[in-house]
Amino acid sequence: MPLPSRVAVAPVSRVRRADVAVTACALFAACAAPGPGPDDLDFAALLQPIPGRVVRDGDELRIDSPALLRDAEHHVWGGSVLRGEDGRYHMFCAMFDAGPGARKFGDEWLFSSVIAHASSAAPDRAYAIDGVLLRGRAAEGDPDAFDAQGVHNPHVLRDDDGVHLFHIGSRDPGAAAVGPTAARLRARDRIQQSQCIGVAHAPSVEALVAGRYERPREPLLVPRTRVKPDNVVAPSPPGTVALPDNLIVVNPSVVRAPDGRVLLYFKGNVYDPGWRGVHGVAVGDSMRGPFRARDEFVFDVRLDDGRIASAEDPFVWFDRRRHRFYALVKDFSGRLTGAGPSLALLTSTDGLDWAPARHPLASAKQLRFADGTVLPVSRLERPQLLFDDDGRPTALFVACIVGGGYRGHACNVQIALVDR
């Protein structure tokens, strides 16, 4: 059964942008004053038990909990939440087909992902899906838009200029358009290599969920280099050095620095020779952009062989009490935490130079329930946080698959946080 659409909105051709010149000194001078505080955040200690219970019946496993957002015919992936003007909590989550006839997980999200809206009276439980907010624009008659195929991995923020819904967008350029270097690419891979970051703007949460938003047709950030040994769409010239925004820019996480500048963190892909997820940061004056990507890699903790430890799904915030940046990331290798694949906590005093925090393990790949069950899971990704008015984190939202790698049915899990 298809998800209902909440709105039908005419696209906006372009949001007006002012030019911006950014230098490292101007950008981060204010971050140094009054000086960083202690790196004493123990994020794992904030995690509260999830309400509900886990029931095992032979080989079957059933989770009875109001803190899991699920849909019988769709995977529910990363969710980002704001408290609305109505006092309710509004989640914007990625959803894609999981019913009969759906492709495997690793392909389906590229073909059918939409951004849905869910809401609840509580921050950490009982969300109900209200409908689809954003679809790929081909469904609206615009097959050439950067996000014609689908939209994914939402990240929502509020500032004095309104509410900003950052997301990934993609399209299939078609087999005839990619040239001889990518002639063997499947449609799935052509779509994957087209991913860019976009943003929709609204004056309020209420306006956003009602469909009163601006959605530029052009992306907010695109890759500057396209370096890959083979099978690459629109490759960079030979000899090009891959920058952090190589081949794709995805998984946006945005934070306003103490000096007022806006930092947009993103993931790119490099091949050395195998795939590795890397990160960079782009800088602007406004959530609307424009953003200028910097050349430095961030979150670049190194393996013993000198390669960057692969990570993804950053969520970055500035801790006002400790006066330092923190980031939650998915740690593929376990190198960031020393505890195996997990969610890791990194920290920085300037937003550029990052290192594992004093307490680097944010969460093992498990869910802890109120009945005492500790349930290992195969996937724990896309961490997003909700904050109170004092800037303290109050809830963690994670995309989760309990078993079977990416073969299981994905849901969004809400975990209450107590920051004493």
Image (cartoon, helix red, strand yellow):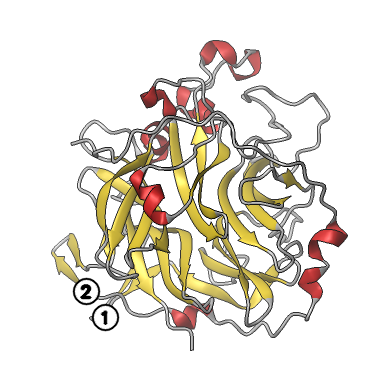
Q: x, y (%) of residue 340?
A: 53, 67
20 and 81: which one is in front? 20
Residue drawn 24% across and 65% down?
Answer: 126
Q: Residue 52 carries which label?
A: 2
Viewer can see residue 93 = no
- Which label was assigned to residue 238? none
**Residue contact between numbered discs 2 and 1, judged by CB atoms under 8 Å:** yes
**Amino acid type shown at disc 2:** Gly
The kind of residue tagged 1 is Ala
Question: Residue 110 is drawn in which quadrant?
Answer: top left
Question: Does 209 sit left or right of 363 as displayed?
Answer: left
Q: What element carries label 2?
A: loop
Residue named by callout 1? 370
Based on the displayed image, in which of its 4 quarters is residue 314 positioned?
Answer: bottom right
Q: Taking 335 as reference, is 200 left or right?
A: left
**Could you tell me how far apart the alpha carbons at marks 2 and 1 are, in whole angstroms?**
6 Å
Q: Earlier in the sequence, mark 2 or mark 1?
A: 2
Image quadrant where one finds the N terminus: top left
